[in-house]
Image: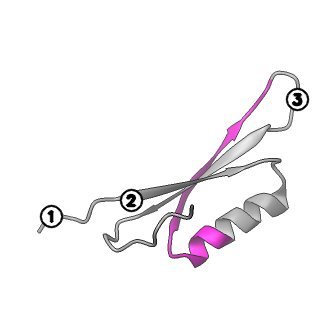
């Protein structure tokens, strides 16, 4: 039996705050996605990240549709 192909979803978060990241993660998980990771985009001008990308994955072929 061939495993179902993995599907991915990415959410851009800016500005990066704990609340914004929490909202993005909670929304994705509530839609049935599994958190894969968070990647931060840094700039030389600041010690804080300029933006973040939250990635989700699912192996379910009937995964929720991507939001517009």
Q: Is residue 32 above or below residue 56?
A: below
Mark 1 or 3, nearer chain start = 1
Examine the image and state in which quarter residue 5 appears.
bottom left
Q: Which mark is residue 7?
A: 2
Residue at 81%, 49% in the rendered image: 16
Q: Tag 1's secondary structure?
A: loop
User: Would you call the spot at circle 2 few (<14 residues within 10 Å), some (14-19), or many (20 or more)?
Assistant: some
The residues tagged by marks 1 and 3 sit, at their Cα atoms, a distance apart of 46 Å
Tell whether label 3 touches label 2 (CB within 8 Å): no
Q: Is residue 61 above or below residue 21?
A: below
Tell whether label 3 touches label 1 (CB within 8 Å): no
Mark 2 or 3, nearer chain start = 2
Residue at 34%, 59% in the rendered image: 6
Residue at 45%, 72% in the rendered image: 64
Quadrant assignment for the N terminus = bottom left
User: Would you call the spot at circle 1 few (<14 residues within 10 Å), some (14-19), or many (20 or more)?
Assistant: few
Q: Position of residue 43 (x, y in %)?
A: 79, 26
Residue at 50%, 69% in the rendered image: 33
Residue with the most extreme front position: 68
Quadrant assignment for the C terminus = bottom right
> Which residues are drawn in magenta?
27-43
Q: Which mark is residue 2?
A: 1
Q: Nearer the viewer, mark 2 or mark 3?
A: 2
Q: Which mark is residue 26?
A: none
Q: Position of residue 52 (x, y in %)?
A: 70, 45
Q: Is residue 17 above or below residue 4?
A: above
User: Would you call the spot at circle 3 few (<14 residues within 10 Å), some (14-19), or many (20 or more)?
Assistant: few
Q: Which residue is mark 3?
A: 46
């Amino acid at each position: 039996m061939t495993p179902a192909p993995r599907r991915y979803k990415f959410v851009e978060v800016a500005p990066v705050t704990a609340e914004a990241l929490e909202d993005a993660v909670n929304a994705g998980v509530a839609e049935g996605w599994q958190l894969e990771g968070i990647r931060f985009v840094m700039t030389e001008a600041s010690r804080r990240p300029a933006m973040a990308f939250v990635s989700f994955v699912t192996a379910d072929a009937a995964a929720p549709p991507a939001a517009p």
